[in-house]
Structures are given as C-alpha cells and as structure tokens.
Amino acid sequence: MILDGLTQAIGNTPLIKIESLSELTGCNILGKAEFMNPGGSVKDRAALWMVKEAETNGTLTKNGTVVEGTAGNTGIGLAHVCNNKGYDCIIYMPDNQSEEKVSLLKTLGAEVRVVPTVPYANEENYQKQAGRYAKTIENAIWANQFDNTANRLAHYETTGPEIWEQTKGNINAFTCATGTGGTLAGVSRYLKEKRQDIQIIAADPYGSAIYNWITEGEPIMSPGPSITEGIGNSRITKNLADTQIDGAIQVKDQEMVDMVYSLLHKDGWFLGSSSGINLCSAYEVAKKLGPGNTIVTILCDDGSKYQSTLFNQEFLERKSLRAGHETQRL
C-alpha cells in the first residue's frame, strides 16, 4: 500500500496481543499500537482532526499558527501536522514533563514555552496561557484539545471503527486512561452504538479526579501526584462529558512501573507510563470478566520519551519507586 503523505499515515495501527498478560488471564488482552503513528503516539489522531476542523471552518488559513497547551504528545503530533501543512506551531508546556519531549518539540521546529506547573483553576495554567496568547496574533487558533470535541470525533471516526473491524466485533471490554477524554469518549461512543454490552472502563492514576467522578459522581482529587504524564485530570472536559462509562480502575505508580518493566523483560515491549496504566487496568478487567473474554486497550506511546524519568533509576528513587520488580497485580 502506498500512502499519500504524512496525514495518511496517521491511524490504522495494528492491534497486538499482549502475550504474557493473555496467558496469565486466559483472555485476549489486545493493545492498539498507537506508538506506530508518525508522531509516535495516539495524540496524532486528535492533532490532525483539530487542524482539519479549523481549516474547514475557516479559522485557520494559509501560513497560520497553531497554539496549544500540552503535556507533550499532542504538541508533537501538532508539530508534525503543522510542518506537513505549512503552519507555525507554538507549544506551552508545564515544567514537570520529560526533557525528551521538550527537546523533540524543538527539533520538530515548534516554539516551546515551558511554564510553571499550576492547577487548571490558576490563570497561569499552561492551557489558559496558550488560549490567551492565541488571541493576540492574527490567523491563529488555540487547538484546545481538552474541550475541542474534534478530539473525540477523531476516535469516533477512526480508533473505534478500527478496533471493531480488527476484532471482528469480538470485544467484551475497552479500557484506557483519560487526560483530555478524547480517546475514551470517542471509542466509547462508537463501540456502544455497536453493542451496549461492551464494557467501557476508565483507568486512572492517583492524583486525579476521574476515578471519583465515575464511581462517586463527584470529581474529587485522589491523593497524588503521579509520575505519569498526560493522563488524569482535575476536571471533566467537554470531550469526556456525557460519555457512557461503566466503571473505573485506579492504578498506583508502583504498579504501573512494575507493569512497564515486566512487559519490557517478558514481552519485549518498551512502553511509556500511560501504556503501563492502561495495561494494569486491562489486566484487572480481564481477571474480573474471566477467561475467554477480549479486552482492548491503548498503547499510547513507547518509552523513548521517558528515559530521564520512568527508565531512570535515580529519578524513580527520588519518587520512592523501584524498577524491575514483578507487579503486585500479576
């Protein structure tokens, strides 16, 4: 197959059986290999859809600028898409993200503005700074990934249908973590239209309000923080609102670390922290549903952006975490 440029290479990622976890549970635990997108993550899909929507409605025209606040992967996806389409890209990032992401964004030609990490309620939050700045320049958009529903539309129109087709409809549950809410919301909407009995389970790190919102009805922050990047949230975004979700699973950082290192040494997969959270949740869902069921999750990105954090022994020790131990969940 010959693809017509970079944007055609976004999506249609393979669905891969996670052998060790499937063997342990008697289920088919499948990971959508989103690290195979051109920008290396699931966020390429939302980046493309948000730019396409702005082009369609006329808010972004030739030689325009895309501004966004991001933990990294959406910015990387936007930088690739902007390069392909001839737009400038300006990224606001909180200062708690990995050095690798900042370096990669600069290499891709994005202007990166690293700002202090503060809660969303603070007017100096990186997302709010991006939104304000976009208003000061002509022919510019704020991508606004958290509340721009083109994000979840990308997954309703691509990720969900791909999962349905790849499993031939033989799927019992879908689980993934949520930051913007786009992936979970879009996939949930599509799969629930196909079969209402497919379980949609949110995975959530500690230091987030999503778990309590789903299980208790209120977005109350759990104790944290977490070393995971780009997932968890203190609020319910427009992408996530009104999404049909059947349950939630909380995952501790040590469990995530153990899962990532276990998968590296047992299966050969070099995955990032959000993928680790997702796989911990998929394992728990599999144990609950029992043998013979098919559970799908998202392998958001690989581990290459986290060598200074998740795969750095000194960093883990500073966070009171240990590398290379078998996960307590297994």
Image (cartoon, rainbow, N blue to C red):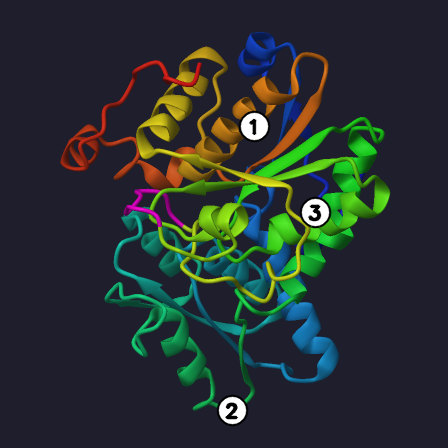
Residue 138's mark?
2
Q: Does the magenta stretch include residue 223?
A: yes
**In the rendered image, which quarter contains the C terminus?**
top left
Look at discs 2 and 1 and give the one toward the viewer. Answer: 1
Q: Nearer the viewer, residue 207 or 101?
A: 207
Q: In this view, does 101 lie to the left or right of 173?
A: left
**Mark positioned earlier in the residue sequence (2 or 1):** 2
Locate residue 161: give its quadrant: top right
Q: Which residue is drawn at 39% across and 76% down?
A: 128
Instruction: Using the image, determine if residue 128 lies above or below residue 212.
Output: below
Q: Nearer the viewer, residue 52 or 124?
A: 124
Q: Name the residue under label 1.
A: 282
Residue 187's mark?
3
Which contiguous range is marked in magenta? 222-229
Q: Position of residue 113 (x, y in %)?
A: 31, 69
Label 1 neighbourhood size at 10 Å, few (<14), some (14-19), many (20+)? many
**Mark positioned earlier in the residue sequence (3 or 1):** 3
